[in-house]
Image: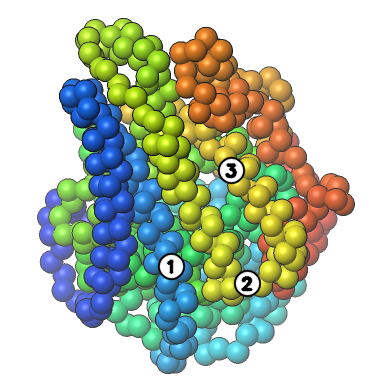
Amino acid sequence: MPPEAPLARPIQNLSAPYTDKTAPGVAKTRSWLWRLATFIPAFATTFALVAAFTDWFAMGGLTGFEIALITLIALTFFWISLSVSTVTVGVARLFLTRPAAAPASGPSMDVALLVPCYNEVPWDVFGNACAMLEQLDAHPTDHRYTLFILSDTRDEATAEQELRAFATLRTRLPDHIRLHYRRRAMNTDRKVGNLADWVERWGGAHDAMLVLDADSLMSGEAIVALTDELSADPSAGLIQSFPQLFGAETVFARVQQFASTIYGAVLAEGLATWSDREGNYWGHNAIIRTAAFASCAGLPKIKTITGKGALILSHDFVEAGLLRRAGWGVRFSPRIKGSYEEVPATLIDYVIRDQRWCQGNLQHLKLLASRGFHGVSRFHLFHGAVSYLLSPMWFLLLMVWALIGTGAEQNVIRYFSGLNPQVQWPEMTVVHSSALLIFMYGMLLAPKALGAAAIGGIGLRVAELGGPVRFAASFVAELILSILYAPILMVQQTLAVARSILGLKVDWKPQARAGGHYSLWSMLKFHWLETLAGAGLLAGMAGGIVSFWLLPIAVSLALAVPLSALSGLNLTRFRATARALGTPEVYAAPAIIRAAKAHRAELRETLGDLPEAAE
């Protein structure tokens, strides 16, 4: 490591307003117009749906249970409407506004690339690092870059291979390329503590830090573009890029990669438009002004019932809110291309990661009353928590809706609540019920349809997606698979919320980035609840006590185990499926991805396989 350059990092008091006024402040923009264009349609559409249901239920007189059901419908449907309006704003912004010119050149900056890792596969981490450093060295720029591998690895065999990988890169790379490695003796406060340790000991020597994850990969052009934007905007404390997914080889990973490329881009454009200078931070692939971060984003511990402080797990949202609270702009810049991250390979791997995120995001509810946060920052915190709370809401809504009109709902409500609901559901005509279903499914599918229609606006050509026939096949396949996996994820997120509410801790183990290998017994144990729920729904349909319109959901849940097995099928093993659900990263991988894969393979051959304990 280089000589230390300490930087003070005071811990913030979330119960008191922020008093340091040294930040330059954020200039006023017309973001409020875009926010109105996003939120008014979402509220209006939700209000129209609620009015329709209220009018329907009111035929027999509204009861307390009916009012509760209408409220649940409003809470769940608003977020669907918000997603549709955000995508619509993104499409409008892409096609109705001219691309912004490259920012004027600001002062050169000394930037630290930070790669925290914890029991990761060494050749993957150092292979990515080597590819990024080589591209930066070849890219003309006045900025200076230093890459730090910040290891919190506990496994001694893996740590030994990290040292060997570092030594290998040090001999391969030219001497003028700055690369350092540090391993902490104790991984206090996990990633938060890892980054805090670097800021406090070496942060004073660098104008900015570009925070990466162990699986992050960014082209030299993207890194320089982010740096240019921060340099040209002295009011910006953080600029978040939009990481695209790469390296997907399994069915589930390809579904996510295709969806992120086609639909995620317009959603990101809409989010960047209405959030403006009150954007969010996703914990990686973002550049941050080091002194600003140190002065105002020191995270306190959350008070618990026992009085012992708890670590803020999903720290990124909170750090973005603290930067904005202090007067720094937080921006999202999705048009910078060349920012990548990897994706969980299987359904189970995705759920395991999602359980950790659920626990962290639900903590945000405790922080909503913090002093000084901007309203949009509070919304980001609230939205992060609600994104998980929606799953149990949907689960309850679907269970009740499955029984409506059969007479069985009366007995179920009476059994669980001890109350006589006295609900007399009015009958819906075929026209009304069909119109309602078409509207609901139309709203759910609208973001995908808009994203597919707007691929030209995000800089993609159909030829880069395999041509019209292959793109159409990928679109249909992604749609079908997403519909099949959605109910399973709903149940798993409901379980994750229940565990968090009950105080059952989730073990934050290193992510199985290459995908775990799960036996049939393991999948049965993991998906037993979905399987039983699906079988129960199918039995209820056979007995006439469950509505048949829930058949797709019932089939998905009943087939949770085979669908989980399908999720890990490696498409690259077969020539006919190697490019299924293909994106530009599949058909013609960019140079940075090709270089990273080559360096990973070379380092793996040099280092040898990891011992079984580290896998």
Q: How packed is label 1: few (under 14 Cα within 10 Å), some, or many (20 or more)?
A: many
Q: Please tell me whether mark 3 sits on a helix, a strand or a loop.
A: helix
Q: Position of residue 280 (x, y in %)?
A: 36, 61
The numbered mark, 3 or 1, whose residue comes first in the sequence reads 1
- The amino acid at mark 1 is Gly
The numbered mark, 2 or 3, whose residue comes first in the sequence reads 2
Question: Could you tell me which quadrant the C terminus lies in?
Answer: top right
Q: Which residue is mark 2?
A: 460
Q: Which residue is mark 3?
A: 482
- The amino acid at mark 3 is Ser
Distance from the alpha carbon under mark 1 to that under mark 2: 15 Å
Above or below, 66 relative to 86: above
Q: Is residue 508 visible?
A: no
Q: Residue at x 70, y 60 (%)?
A: 471
Q: Position of residue 121 (x, y in %)?
A: 67, 50
The numbered mark, 1 or 2, whose residue comes first in the sequence reads 1
Question: Viewer-proximal residue, 526 or 267?
Answer: 267
Q: Residue at x 42, y 28 (%)?
A: 398
Distance from the alpha carbon under mark 2 to that under mark 3: 22 Å
Distance from the alpha carbon under mark 3 to that under mark 1: 22 Å
Residue 90 has which mark? 1
Determine whether, in the image, residue 243 is placed left or right of residue 466: left
Q: Position of residue 587 (x, y in %)?
A: 76, 65
